[in-house]
Amino acid sequence: MARKCQITGVGPISGSNISHAHNKTKRRFLPNLQKKRIWVKELNKFVTVKLTASALRTISKNGTGQIAKLVQEGKIKAR
C-alpha cells in the first residue's frame, strides 16, 4: 500500500542529510500515517482509512463529511 494519506494526498518528500562537514546525501521524509477506523454518521457505518495525524485532527474538528464524500465517489472502501 502506498505511503499516502487517503484524505489529503500527502506523501513522502525528498531532502538531504547534511553532515557536520556539510556533505549532502539524499533521504526521504515520510508522513506520519495512522490507520484509523472512523464512524461516519452520514453513512451510518465504520470506515477504515489511512491518514496523517494532522488530517485526523482536522476530521475531529470539522466532521466526517469529507470521508463520506470520498466513500460515495468510490475512492475509499467502506466495510
Image (cartoon, helix red, strand yellow):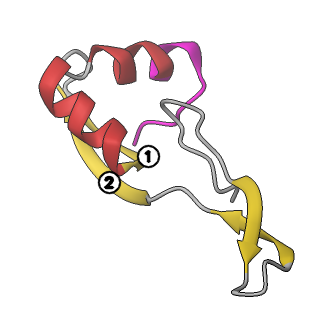
Residue 68 left/right relative to 30:
left
Q: Specify whether residue 13 is painted magenta.
A: no
Q: CA distance from mark 1 to mark 2?
A: 8 Å
Instruction: Say which quadrant the C terminus sits in.
Output: top left
Of marks 1 and 2, the one in the foreground: 1
The residue identified by callout 2 is 36
Instruction: Sort mark 1 into few (<14), some (14-19) or many (20+) by Cα contacts within 10 Å.
Output: many
Judged from the image, the secondary structure of the residue bearing numbered disc 1 is strand
Q: Residue at x 42, y 48 (%)?
A: 52
Instruction: Say which quadrant the N terminus sits in.
Output: bottom right
Q: Quick check: marks 1 and 2 in contact, CB under 8 Å?
A: yes
Image coords of residue 3 (percent x, y): 64, 56
In the picture as drawn, the residue positioned furthest to the bottom comes out as 20
Residue 58 vs residue 43, the one in the foreground: 58
Q: Residue at x 48, y 31 (%)?
A: 7
Residue 31 left/right relative to 48:
right
Residue 36 vs residue 73, the one in the foreground: 36
- Amino acid found under the numbered disc labelled 2: Lys
Image coords of residue 44 (percent x, y): 19, 25
- Which is nearer the N-term, disc 1 or disc 2? 2
Q: Quadrant of residue 15?
A: bottom right
Q: Residue at x 72, y 84 (%)?
A: 19
Segment colored magenta:
71-79
Indicate which disc residue 4 carries.
none
The count of marks equals 2
- Amino acid found under the numbered disc labelled 1: Leu
The residue identified by callout 1 is 51
Q: Quadrant of residue 22?
A: bottom right
